[in-house]
Image (cartoon, grey):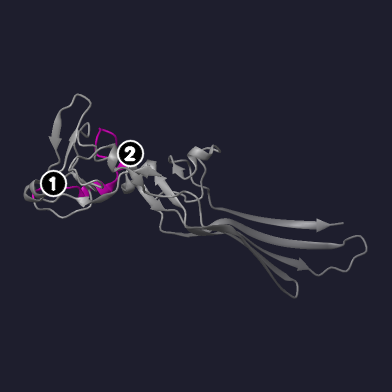
Amino acid sequence: FYGYKTDGVISSAAEADELGLYQVDATGTRTNFEAGDIKFVDLNNDKCIDEKDKTIIGNPNPDLFGNIFTRFTYKDWTLNVAMNYSLGNDVYNYYRSQLEGGQNFFNQSTAMLNRWTVDGQSTDMPRAVYGDPKGNARFSDRWIEDGSYLRLKTVQLSYNVPVNYNWLQGITVWCAAENLLTFTKYLGNDPEFSVNNNVLYQGVDAGLLPQSRSFHLGVKVNL
């Protein structure tokens, strides 16, 4: 992921004056960043926040990923457990960028209640301004999150009922659960997603429906 790095929110007018950050729009008009705006990192130290300040802000490719399968048996009982995991991958939470951007009239999340509103306020949520003239909601590390997770994918418990009939080989009663637990710090709905098979869309969360938790009961009869 390639974009802007951030360093919190400018808390006061005095801090804004001290930083002296500004931007220049397509018409050549210069505007200064003010209190309540995101404090973008000025990588080339020219006070102007522009394309030259972009850098690598994340990597959607995991360092390690895979599956874990295990099976336990005790007399006529069998427990099968399957887990999958991903470690070290970053996610662009596009869904959250729309719900916490504060630049339009769309419904916003409750996180916006902590937005900057008064001079001197210390918060990590910038002010809400229609149209976002300072680009506070632009593509930056605000929306890049750790997508590592460990998911209890499938759990199945089965019991082989003892039978002693020539015409009946066996009866198995079983119950199973899918997507039972997920351990992750990711703030989105589901860290295990794929918005598109294209490599350019890897690690982009557009707010697709998460994988549902499901439970099953069954009986298998072998004649």
Q: Which mark is residue 150?
A: none
Q: Is residue 29 above or below residue 64?
A: above
- Residue at (80%, 57%) from the top-left corner? 221
Q: Which residues are magenta?
A: 99-119
Secondary structure of the residue carrying numbered label 2: helix
Say whether residue 153 is left or right of residue 47. right
Is residue 23 visible in the rendered image? The answer is: yes
- Residue 169's x, y, as percent? 87, 62
Q: Is residue 128 above or below residue 122?
A: above
**Residue kind at label 2, given as amino acid type:** Gln
Does the magenta portion include 117? Answer: yes
Front-lying residue, 56 or 109: 56
- Residue at (33%, 40%) from the top-left corner? 139
- Residue 167's x, y, as percent? 91, 60
**Residue kind at label 1, given as amino acid type:** Thr
Quadrant in the picture for the N terminus: top left
Residue position for label 2: 98
Say whether residue 119 is left or right of residue 209. left
Secondary structure of the residue carrying numbered label 1: loop
- Residue at (32%, 41%) from the top-left corner? 99
The main secondary structure of the magenta stretch is loop
Q: Earlier in the sequence, mark 1 or mark 2?
A: 2
Residue position for label 1: 117
